Image (cartoon, rainbow, N blue to C red):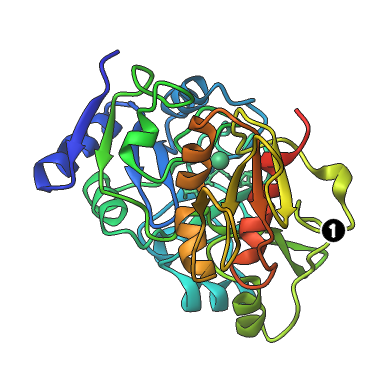
Amino acid sequence: MQTLTLRQDPQGIARAAELLAAGQAVALPTETVYGLAADARDGAAVARIYAAKGRPAFNPLIVHVADTAAARAIALLDDEAERLAAVFWPGPLTLVLPLRPGSGLAGIVTAGLDTVGVRVPAHPVAQAVLAAFGGPLAAPSANASGRISPTTAAHVLDPDGGLAGRIAAVIDGGPCPVGVESTIVGWRDGRAALLRPGGIPAEAVEAALGRPLDRAGHLAAPDSPGQLSSHYAPRAALRLDADAPRPGETFVGFGRVDGADLTLSATGDLTEAAARLFDVLRAADRLGRPIAVARVPGTGLGLAINDRLRRAAAPR
Ligand code: TXA
Ligand code: MG
């Protein structure tokens, strides 16, 4: 299969919508990372996502919709979910909600669960494709399973860990402004829980809810090292919280550190570090040496950055 690169103009958007309507998988930019989209109502189309990514079929996918009204058509939003939707959508927040009976979603999207992860993306290209296509789009990150998430169209097509030749098209919308995946919030026993730290700081969600999130379950939680699974993985070994490089290491800095070969943010800006994270990991990996990363604070977007770094560093 020859993978088309489409421009983010009306013709490119229209072609992407046609391919999606024909049951193809198309990669597109969102504000977080590039997603690999397919019609969430068409099981065969969604199966193409799993096939292209080489993803285990028990992992449920996030469904992208144009607005909160479209979210209500596939999921049940209680008062707390409505409040978070009003504050953060469109934007990098995914809500895991009870599936609405008769939602029309293919069972493969939710991997048979009775919940669905839903988000309204803010990126203008993602919004334009949703409008042109006119339905819900299932979309995980557009990388081979377990590899670094893509934040440019070139990453999506990377011969190493990318999807060139495995998907119908990618829309080139430039670099993703947020750079880490969405924050995922779900409800356990009536209590809102942080399922994955991401592009919206957990503190901001807590402020909107007026109460703390249950943070016990997410992978960066210090009390659950056993849940760490290798993910977002570069080829090279990764050492975290490094004060300085050891001989032979590539040193990725944050803020004012000596001897850095690359930096997430020379000024110690967490927003910049999130936007650059996956790009810098790729660049460090290309140097072919073990990677050491300087300490990044765990507040705000730093929670998501540390989560991704810990998974990248996990044994595999
Ligand atoms: O920013 C993002 O969220 C990006 C862009 C493309 O929107 N998407 C993304 O999707 O990161 P993915 O598939 O790489 O990660 C989705 C995560 C998985 O960890 C999955 O297990 C979880 O969301 N998830 C999805 N539906 C769920 C559900 N019903 N219950 C629990 N977890 C769910
Ligand atoms: Mg992913």
137, above or below 234, in the image: below
Q: Is residue 51 above or below residue 252?
A: above
**Quarter of the rendering occupied by the N terminus:** top left
Q: Position of residue 10 (x, y in %)?
A: 11, 47
Residue at image location 29% in from the left, 56% down from the top: 127
Residue 7 or 56: which is nearer the viewer? 7
**Residue type pointed to by label 1:** Pro
Label 1: state its secondary structure. loop
In the image, taking residue 20 as reference, residue 38 lies left or right, namely: right
Q: Quadrant of residue 291?
A: top right
| Residue at the far left in the pictured view | 11
In x, y percent, where is residue 213?
Answer: 74, 72
Q: Who's the residue at 46% across and 28% down the image? A: 49
Residue 100 is at least partly visible in this image = no
Percent x, y of residue 145: 57, 29
Q: Which residue is mark 1?
A: 222
Q: Is residue 92 left or right of residue 201?
A: left
Can residue 296 be seen from the camera position used here? Answer: yes
